[in-house]
Image: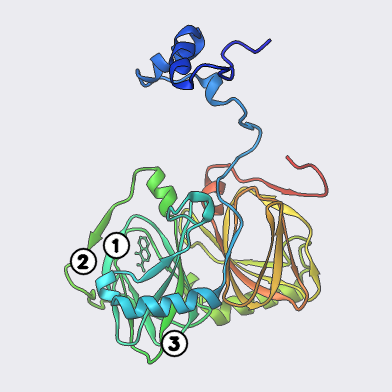
Amino acid sequence: MPRKGAVSAPTEVSPVVTRPMQRSEDPEAAFHARIGAENLGALWVGRRGVDLARPGTPARPAVWRYGDVRPRLMEAGGLIGAEDAFRRVLVLQNPGFGGAMRATQTLYAGIQIVLPGEIAPCHRHSQTAIRFVIEGNGALTTVDGAATAMAPGDMVVTPQWSWHDHRNEGGEPAIWLDILDTPLIDALDTVFRETHPETLQPLTRTGAESGPAANRRAGPARAALDRLARETPPDPCLGWRFRYDDPGPTMAAFLQRLPVGFDGAPRRATDGAVYCVVEGEGATETGDGAFEWRVKDVFVVPGWCRHRHVSGGGAVLFGVSDLAVQERLGLWRERRSGGGES
Ligand code: 1HN
């Protein structure tokens, strides 16, 4: 006996004729159709078949290989200037979001290229940006009147609502990973943006080369990670992880070392993360398949995705996640397992 409300298969008559008749004869289906037109929906129907015990992000584990992306960046460089594009970026679109500009549920990620002599004009917005330099010396980013040189392995933070522009005064392409909290800020309907009246803002102060900004340089960050590795045993899931000082209210940034012969234990955490491989190679295994990565590749581990890293020769990863906002809201969770798939 079919349950009330279940749609039975049409038999001999044409479905074109049958379906409307069945709907009007079925009081529950008729009810849903009627209230839908009144902008109402039945919760018990909307939740049917949905696992309410855990989050279900559409984000998928994904990897972008630098060997594939770099030629596309160079092609883009021949198609449009940095100033015309405003930001010449290839966006890393997680395949789970059907072409939307999302790497994870809350993070946007893209790879930006500024060719020698080019300028990316000044603007500001309510999102926070974290940049991690992949290649090229000679680019400068100016944030609220202070210019900062960008060298490979450096992390630069553009705080929310701070004026910023980029220029490349060197002789080689400057390429970096941009990670912004755009999907999160957008979900709050709080994205604002303003263009500066000048292409490059005036330099009004010298760069803050002490405090957090200094520790975001490749050298000091690496020294801090190496010190951790000398002084503490590796975490079975993470290896050694150095957390950068305060990159803003929503995101956390890490430099992480997987030791030689690493055969990581499985872990899941609610913060979805974007990683850039700084050194070495390895692989990440997830319930959705495994992928290999090598230096300069970028990969995503979505929130609450059970995964483990392996690396024969050891590796260094740079990572950004939405951990900071989850901590502030008291939502962050982690599970290290063995069993228990929930
Ligand atoms: C932005 O301001 C930059 O300043 C890069 O380099 C990417 C993506 C979305 C919104 C703002 C930049 C961006 C962005």
Going from N to C along the chain, the mark reached first, 2 or 3, is 3
Residue lying at 50% horizontally and 62% vertically, measured from the top left: 246
Rendering quarter of residue 189: top left
> As shown in the figure, which amino acid type bears the numbered disc 2?
His
Q: Determine whether, in the image, residue 127 is placed left or right of residue 70.
A: left
Residue type, mark 1 in image: Arg
Q: Give the residue at mark 1.
A: 124
Residue extending furthest toward the left: 197
Tell me residue 144's x, y (percent): 30, 69
Of the residues tagged 1 and 3, which is closer to the observer? 3
The N terminus - image quarter: top right
Judge from the rendering whether residue 186 lies leftward or rightward of residue 123; answer left or right.
Answer: right
Q: Residue furthest front?
A: 12
Q: Sequence order check: which comes first, mark 1 or mark 2?
A: 1
Q: Secondary structure at mark 2?
A: loop
The disc at residue 80 is none
Front-most of residues 290 and 205: 290
Spatial distance from mark 1 to mark 2, Cα to Cα?
8 Å
Q: Residues within 10 Å of mark 1 (few under 14, many from 20)?
A: many
**Label 3 belongs to which residue?**
137
Looking at the image, which residue is at 42% across and 63% down? Answer: 129
Instruction: Please say if 248 is above or below 12.
Output: below
Query: In the image, residue 312 lies at what x, y percent?
Result: 78, 75
Q: For disc 1, does the CB lie below 8 Å from ligand 1?
A: no
**Residue 179 horizontal/vertical position (percent):** 46, 63
Q: Considering the numbered disc 1 on the image, is that residue within a helix, a strand or a loop?
A: strand
